[in-house]
Amino acid sequence: MTHSPPEALKRFIWDIQSMVELADSEREILVIGRDLMTRLIAADDWLPSAFSATDPACGQQFQLYADAMDRFTVVSTVLAPGQATAVGVEPFWQICGVLRGAFARRSFDFDAEGKVLRSDKEQELDRGAVLTSRAQGAAQLANLHSDRVSIAIQVFGGDIGKTPRHTLTTEGAALFGPTSYANAPDAPPYDIWTIQTRIED
């Protein structure tokens, strides 16, 4: 693939990076970030095919941008029909926008022994929806469609590819390694050098 970011993604990354550098609080990041994400996902034709491929065995996560200081990461989460992510305790703030399809975001609690308890908290996120959350609780994204792919663009307040995280099962919480991104060798994430080219207004 030609390693030049789509203009919409380039602008979004540039604005997110500026926001993270200048924001005074996490709340400010989430408020401004919601507006930036809403603009990004207004059109769904900009995501390169290299970052939207499915795997019949499990959901895929592709790193779209690698911040050199690990202050945030931009990821596309791609779920084939009927797929869901693992139930995980997220260690960072997050901005999530639905680029294609629709998702159910399921919240979970766990008891004193660390065993997962399914709560009745479930949000349906349709195309164009944006959800922000702080670093707390456990959640899962599931594709609501049985006949098509759903894709979410997520910004995490750190690099989930470098940070051990907890997943929850009926047996309790277990620490697992950093997220393994699905990027192919010829489709690495974009970096500061690829977004510093001229941005068209």
Image (tube, rainbow, N blue to C red):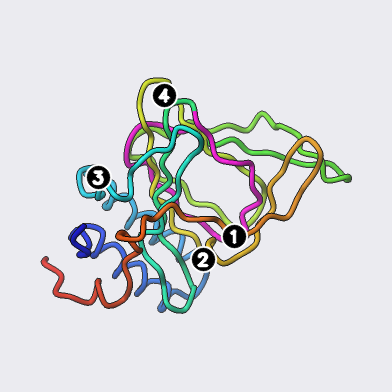
Label 1 element class: loop
Q: The residue under label 4 is which amino acid type? A: His
Q: The residue under label 1 is which amino acid type? A: Pro
In the displayed orientation, state which residue is furthest to the top: 146
Label 3 element class: loop
Q: Residues within 10 Å of mark 1 (few under 14, many from 20)?
A: some
Q: Position of residue 167 (x, y in %)?
A: 68, 47
Alpha carbon of mark 2 to alpha carbon of mark 3: how far?
A: 25 Å
Q: Residues within 10 Å of mark 4 (few under 14, many from 20)?
A: some
Work out whether mark 2 precedes mark 3 in sequence or the reverse, and give the earlier one: 3
Q: Is residue 21 left or right of residue 112?
A: left
Identified at 64% across, 41% down, the residue is: 87
Q: Nearer the observer, disc 1 or disc 4?
A: 1
Q: Is residue 4 left or right of residue 188?
A: left
Q: Is residue 26 magenta?
A: no
Q: The residue under label 2 is which amino acid type? A: Asp
* Depth order, front residue of 44/167: 167
Residue at image mark 4: 145
Residue at image mark 3: 42
Residue at image mark 2: 159
Q: Nearer the observer, disc 2 or disc 1?
A: 1
Q: Position of residue 102 (x, y in %)?
A: 40, 31
Q: Are marks 2 and 4 in contact (CB under 8 Å)?
A: no
Residue numbers of the magenta segment? 83-104
Alpha carbon of mark 2 to alpha carbon of mark 4: how far?
A: 29 Å
Q: The residue under label 3 is which amino acid type? A: Ala
Give the quadrant of residue 109.
top right
